[in-house]
Image (tube, rainbow, N blue to C red):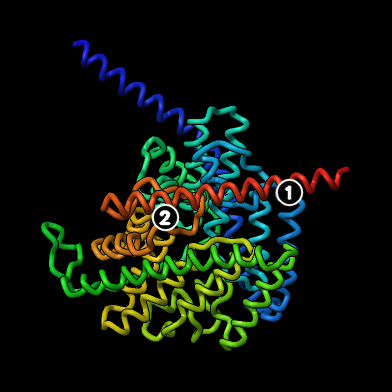
Amino acid sequence: MYTKLQNSSEQIRIAQHLLRWSLLVMPMAVVVGLLVALFLWVLEQATQLRHANLWLISFLPLAGVVIYALYRFAGKNAEAGNNLIIDEIHQSGGGIPLRMAPLVLLSTVVTHLFGGSAGREGTAVQLGGSLAAYFCKKMSLGQADRRILLLSGMAAGFGAVFGTPVTGAIFALEVLAVGRIKYEALMPCLLASLVADLTCRAFPVHHTHYSIANISHEAVGHFAAVAFDLSLLIKVLLAGALFGCASYLFSQLSHWIKAKSEQVISRRWLIPVVGGLLVLAISSVLGNFDYLGLGVNSPDPAGISIVSAFSAGGADSFSWLWKLILTAITLGMGFKGGEVTPLFFIGATLGNSLAVASGAPIDLFAGLGFIAVFAGATNTPLACTMMGVELFGAENVIYFAVACFTAYYFSGHTGIYQSQRVAVSKFHSDASKIETLKKIKADNRQYRAAKRGQSSNESNKRVKRRN
């Protein structure tokens, strides 16, 4: 009898817990959804304006100086972006300023208006994180509750910007640490992502729809609608390895360009100028400007884009590499935006090329690359598998999982977020695991020390200016 009463009281406490978090999360998620809707609308207007007036791209270097000045004089610690949010969730530090939201929104729109090769996920996540931090401050939440609300803010921004609410919730939980998910924020993240997505959809903004044609298949167990073909599965496995290598290349090149540019160019405002000139020069040498901006659609019917990559002839053999290089330069040299939509472009066009070479279905391999390169670069294979289901349907879920899981392993222990920690090594042998974790922990200590040093230098400079 006592046990039954105890279990009953436990269910009551759970209900109270869910009700409390519903009341905490929903107002924040609604505001995030509103801001993401505004952001998507403004971004679409900026993209259309650039398409109609291509001469605007000649001002990309000047736009870089404007972005530098915005963060230099008004940014505080907001320039760290997604890494700042992840660091704050791991361990509370200097806080996340509310100014991050308008700064990242404005600077991302400026980047796209003048032709920078960037995405939008980073902006949406920072909108969610900064607003969640503001709500935490106003409600005087403790560290544990603050962590959950910050995760919910990340989920809300991600789910709303791509129209994938379940993916948004899983992504926020999975991205913190490689190999480990903590479920204490599961329901708040899901609720926040759903509410933000519904709020965003209530406005006249739209998400791009993709489709993969039905593939003849054998039934898997009792699931007649799930595709499975052994020869195709082997091709998917090999493609997944290459998708992971592309993720690794993008992450390493982005970090190298950022570090090298800060080392070589002493005047910080010159870094985005050089970056803008490089983007324009490479695009001019290539003879087209398909790799600028988001790359979801192209104003030229014969142009290369994410949408075109799902059709035969929709990408060149090295389209993925050019987008990879231009995005690494754009984001590594001071422009703002996200990495995810460019990763979709890289993956979809690489998938197109691999499908042509292997005789596999082009739309399927474009979709696999779309999610798998993202999975490898962010170390979030579960979220990306779910993204495949939400975007393309569940029929090919086996191929989605194989591609994303394989890419996750082949991307190594690198990633686009330097604040992401490694909880579990991807290697299983004890010796290699110990060495790998030692190296990663040393790299993380070096990164955090560099950030502290940078913040200290900026503070000293401000004190000197005041004196």
Which residue type carries mark 1?
A: Glu
Location of residue 107 (image quadrant)? bottom right
Residue at the disc numbered 1 = 458
Location of residue 412 (image quadrant)? bottom left
Q: Secondary structure at mark 2?
A: loop
Q: Residue at x 86, y 44 (%)?
A: 466
Q: Position of residue 357 (x, y in %)?
A: 31, 84
Q: Taking 141 as reference, is 195 left or right? A: left
Which residue type carries mark 2?
A: Thr
Q: Viewer-nearest of labels 1 and 2?
A: 1
Residue at the disc numbered 2 = 164
Q: Position of residue 283 (x, y in %)?
A: 60, 82
Sequence-wise, the earlier of marks 1 and 2 is 2
Q: Taking 199 as reference, is 116 left or right? A: right
Q: Residue at x 34, y 21 (%)?
A: 12
Q: Taking 448 as reference, is 423 left or right? A: left
Q: Quadrant of the C terminus?
A: top right
Q: Nearer the viewer, residue 456 or 315?
A: 456
